[in-house]
Image: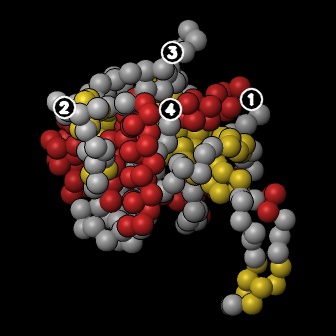
Amino acid sequence: MSVPGLTPTPCVLPQRLAAPERSADTCALIVAGGVGERFGDACGKQYVELCGLPIVCWSLIAFDRAPSVAQIVLVVAEGRLQDVRSEVLPRVSLDAPVVLARGGATRQDSVSAGLAAMDETLALVAVHDAARPLIETPAIETCVARLRADEGLDGAICAARSTDTLKLVEGETVVATPDRSFYWAAQTPQAFRTRTLKAAHRAARFDDYRGTDDASLVERRGGRIACVETSTTNLKVTHPNDFLIAQAFMEARLMSEGCGISPMEGGL
């Protein structure tokens, strides 16, 4: 489904947000190494076209526009490296330098590979799932700024407050209804001090520990993590129905902002 009267430009131009005078200090580590088994596309959901661009491109655009970002590390499956170089990256014109890294067997392994490939002089790293194409640049900046502003923090993560009633269940039997005000749904990006996240990944490898996200690796070592409230539209495309929702949100955004699209002759 396309936006009536509008077509994506062949190459989206860089357009950074205005920012106070300070040097960029953050590496954007975008993980696009999954195979998308639940999505049902053998090529990987991150390469499916969403409103005229591969899903991964929308994350690249959002981070490239963030004034905090000095470098982008894109982690992809080894078999897709050449395809990304020749068919994906040419679709967008980015201001920040992009480094490609080979993904591992798991997401955690892929993040570790990205950390090894990043510019080690950058103080902060923001890890993001390429399958969240609706992330917006202001949310990235708010998350990174929250971490930067508090030296007592080890990380800051985008998250949304739970709006559903939650049930603790054993088998199929409800055993408790916890207070949902304590519960947030974790998203990405998740920003950390580089040295802290690298140490957390080293410890996880040593202990053969597998976390559900990067924040959990830092938490288990006593790290202090803050939640930064972000819109629930920052959804993860996991199943085909998620793609339809993401497409509707993206089309609405393009209609209101005109980001990366141009009028067709005789169109709007």
Q: Mark 4 points at which residue?
A: 137
- Residue 46 in sight here: yes
Asked if disc 2 and disc 1 are in contact, CB closer than 8 Å, the reply is: no
Q: Position of residue 157 (x, y in %)?
A: 63, 44
Q: Are marks 4 and 3 in contact (CB under 8 Å)?
A: no
What's the residue at 54%, 43% (across, down)? 189
> Mark 1: which amino acid?
Asp
Is residue 194 shown to the viewer in this render? no
Distance from Cα at disc 1 to Cα at disc 3? 22 Å
Q: Which of marks 4 and 3 is nearer the N terminus?
A: 3
- The first of marks 1 and 3 along the sequence is 3
Query: At x 56% / y 9%, what residue is drawn?
Result: 21
Q: Which label sits in the foreground, 4 or 1?
A: 4
Disc 4/disc 3 C-alpha distance (Å):
11 Å
The type of residue carrying mark 3 is: Ala
**Circle 3 is placed at which residue position?**
18
